[in-house]
Image: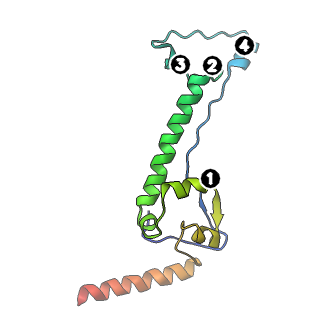
């Protein structure tokens, strides 16, 4: 987390979202003659078990959980110094579709303050530090 974000021309910023997966091994187990029987209370306790094919309940729960994580991520980005300064909104970040943007495109989307080389950012940081030090002395 930083107060300002700079990216090189080919730098990539974005992918603001969340994802998860469910890998069903039910078919492989069946081919091997392995049957897994769950005893669960309530029955939906095993909705995301990999030994089972994903059913409607598992799909809904997985989608819900990813949505919760993605929403929290977008809100944190919007509440960060750059998010506040650039006026980012969760809806705007959602509209990006978790795209990864490079250079000026990231700046245009509000995800970065500018495009700069490492040397340019280092010089800028040193100048900012000098200004803050001078302000403290006065």
Q: Which residue is drawn at 43% across and 55% down?
A: 76
Closest to the observer, 17 or 132: 17
Q: Which of marks 1 and 2 is in front?
A: 1
Asked where in the image residue 35 lies, by quadrant, the reply is top right
Among numbered discs 3 and 4, the one appearing first in the sequence: 4
Helix or strand or loop: what does disc 1 sit on?
loop
Horizontal side of 41 relative to 109 (left or right) equals left
Of mark 2 and mark 4, the one earlier in the sequence is 4
Label 4: few (<14), some (14–19) or many (≥20) C-alpha neighbours in 10 Å: few
Circle 3 or circle 4, nearest the eye: 3
Q: Quadrant of the N terminus?
A: bottom left
Check the image and report above or below for 117 versus 72: below
What numbered label is drawn on residue 51? Answer: 2
Question: Which dot, 1 or 3, sits closer to the camera?
Answer: 1
Q: Is residue 64 visible?
A: yes
Alpha-carbon neighbours of circle 2 within 10 Å: few (<14), some, or many (≥20)? many
What residue does disc 1 label? 97
How far apart marks 2 and 4 lie (CA) works out to 10 Å
Q: In this view, does 59 lie above or below 131?
A: above
Please say if the residues under marks 3 and 2 sit with CB atoms less than 8 Å apart: no
SS type, badge 2:
loop
Closer to the observer: label 3 or label 2? 3
Q: How far apart are marks 1 and 2 (CA)?
A: 31 Å
Mark 4 lies on a secondary structure that is: helix
Give the image location of residue 27, x and y in percent. 73, 18
Residue 118 is tagged as none
Which residue corresponds to mark 4? 30
């Amino acid at each position: 987390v930083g107060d300002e974000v700079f990216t090189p021309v080919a730098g990539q910023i974005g992918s603001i979202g969340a994802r998860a997966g469910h890998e069903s091994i039910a078919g492989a187990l069946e081919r091997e003659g392995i049957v897994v029987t769950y005893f669960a209370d309530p029955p939906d306790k095993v909705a995301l078990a990999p030994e089972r094919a994903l059913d409607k309940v598992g799909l809904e729960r997985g989608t819900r959980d990813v949505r919760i994580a993605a929403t929290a991520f977008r809100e944190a980005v919007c509440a960060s110094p750059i998010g506040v300064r650039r006026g980012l909104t969760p809806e705007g970040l959602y509209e990006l579709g978790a795209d990864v943007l490079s250079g000026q495109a990231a700046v245009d989307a509000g995800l970065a303050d500018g495009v700069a080389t490492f040397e340019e950012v280092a010089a800028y940081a040193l100048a900012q530090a000098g200004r803050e030090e001078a302000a403290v002395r006065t």
